[in-house]
Image: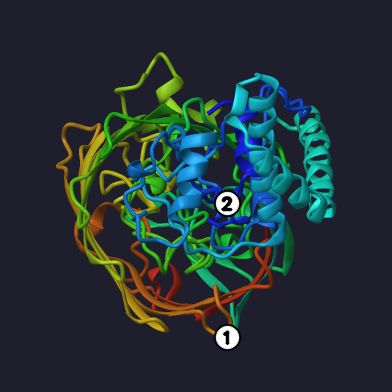
Amino acid sequence: MSNFKLIRYLMAVLPLVTIGATIGVIVAPASALEVKADAKSNLQQPEKVDLAALDLYARDLSAKDETLNETDTAIDAVTSVSQLTDVKPTDWAFQALQSLVERYGCIAGYPDKTFKGNRAITRYEFAAGLNSCMDRINDLVSASTGDAVKKSDLETLRKLQEQFAAELTTLRGRVDGLEGRVATLEKQQFSTTTKLSGQVWINMTGAFAGSPVTAERSLLQGGANPNLAPTRVGGVPTQVQRSQPNITLSNYLFLNLTTSFTGKDALVTQLVAGNASSPANQLVSAGFFNSWGTPITDQTGTPQAGSNAVYIREMSYTFPLSDKIRVAVGPRLNTYRYFDSNRFTSFLTGASSFNSSGSTLFAAVDRGAGAVITWDISPQFRLAAGYLSENTEFLNPALGFNTAANPTVGLFGSTNQLVSELTYSPSKSANFRLLYSRSLLRPYNGFIGGAVGEPLPYGYADDGFGGRVKDATADTVVANFDWTITPQVGIFGRYSYGRTGINPVDAARVGGDITVQSIQMGLGFPDLGKKGALGVISYLIPHTYTGGRQFLLSGAGDGGKQQELEISYYYPINKNIAIVPSMYAIFNPNNFSTNPTVFIGNLRTQFTF
């Protein structure tokens, strides 16, 4: 539909009405009406129209339950009243409608060829309809079509024009004002194809322990670096004692640029910046940086710790192959946009820590280069499959990371992962997901583990004697569900199983498999205290090793079983601002049964725009 017709379309936001016994002005509502454009109209339309502004204008003129659908296409003005399937000769307004259709041609119907003649209207809507028929009669008069316009009709029209003069003036004034607003918006708009949105988080976080916490770390730098792997002394990894950290106040932000060229595709560019190192990172064993006790929004998000440097977090292009199949490709796809979702563990509104927001055994590649295909098989079944090669924004390429963009390793070198997930949704209230991932893991510092170690998960693995290892193959299976039992109560859970193959560089040493499992269960409380709010209680065993413990350079502890309890509450103040208090309790942290329980408190303010 042309922009000119769109303005006329909005001017005619009209339900059905009969005006006078002679002229019987009857018009259709805006959501499907298209009145014939008046070539002599004094309304000069801009070449481009801001649809959002026009929609606001249309809603101001028409009833709240009738809004403009940009994809609707009205049928041409009808030439016979018989084309309107819901109009019968016995209808009281039939003759008036027939006169307008057959004599003046200023009537159009809905796309389904109905007229819907029983809807009430406002005086402004009536005035808009009167204006459209006046324009049509002016056309007929100017064209000198003889007696096409009866003198009695003109007299009736004149009286109506006088009676509704104020409304017609107001209507034209509104349109003139709208034109000015549209022109201003077009000059000031960011882009005709790109939408800018964002999220900003401000975090206050503290970690509290009653006594020093034992962690498996390197003794270099006084044991302060959580990324340096320990060494084995007498076969036992070196340990350090970590004291309680101080409370921090930090920020984290996303800027999202979403571009569409066809209305069905999306080019996503997400920028990230932050300045945090969450307090719990002072207590973790090597390789567990940004894992237990750390809110996802309490991080730097880039290789430059604490810098607030801006990096590209996500870059992908998504387009449809058909109505049911979509493809996403790009150099930096976000794995969690497509896999292992759960309505109660999304960090934006639900469980907020790294460990509780998704499976701890998935994924080795958080962001990667490659492609993902999603297929909506039916309303109940959805299949997603993808290949991603490591290109994660917070990993430093100077240390060998971002291998997908490194020509010495490339798109198909380690680290990479193949993922498939089948989702079954028997109703809107329940979702069941089964995921499988096959990974090839790169030993960046000679050991498997760290941020690209899943399904180890985290920590570091060697050959059992402190020696280096080769690339490792790994398998992960995750079963994940969420179920809203009532509108106010839901349950969720995850079970994950992982296997990582250890292949020593020293051929004299025997490799093997590290097998591990994790389990999570919890409760969700939608609309708790306010519509849109969400309370979540999550219980998690992040990693229980069932085999290959001898290969763990960090993470085994003294055989204890780490457990985590998280309680969070998302409270929206309005659609743009939310307050989210969270509390985590970490039992047997770092898998040391002798460690004290660590309590973490986080209060974040979340801004969305």
Q: Secondary structure at mark 1?
A: loop
Assign a secondary structure to mark 2: loop
Say which of marks 2 and 1 sits in front. Answer: 2
Q: Quadrant of residue 607?
A: bottom right
Q: CA distance from mark 2 to mark 1?
A: 53 Å
Q: Amino acid at mark 2?
A: Gly
Rendered location of residue 326, percent (x, y): 31, 35
Q: What kind of colouring is applied to the model shown?
A: rainbow
Q: Could you say where residue 131 lies in the image, as x and y percent from the top left?
A: 70, 42
Image side of residue 209 versus residue 353, left or right: right
2 and 1 marks in contact (CB < 8 Å)? no
Residue for badge 1: 529
Q: Is residue 22 above or below residue 320?
A: below
In terms of depth relative to the viewer, which is nearer, 354 or 484? Answer: 484
Q: Is residue 368 above or below residue 123?
A: above
Residue 276 visible to an observer of this rendering:
no
Q: Is residue 324 left or right of residue 58?
A: left
Residue count near mark 1 (Cα–Cα under 10 Å), binned few <14, some 14–19, many ≥20? few
Residue 392 in the image: above or below residue 543: above
Q: Identify the residue position indicated by label 2 in the image.
A: 24
Residue 429 placement (x, y as % from top left): 31, 71
Q: What label does residue 65 carry, if any?
A: none
Residue at the (63%, 26%) spot, across then down: 140
Residue 458 visible (yes or no) = yes
Q: Nearer the viewer, residue 528 or 11?
A: 11
105 or 331, which is in the foreground?
105
Residue flagged by tag 1: what amino acid is it? Gly
Q: Residue at x 77, y 35 (%)?
A: 185
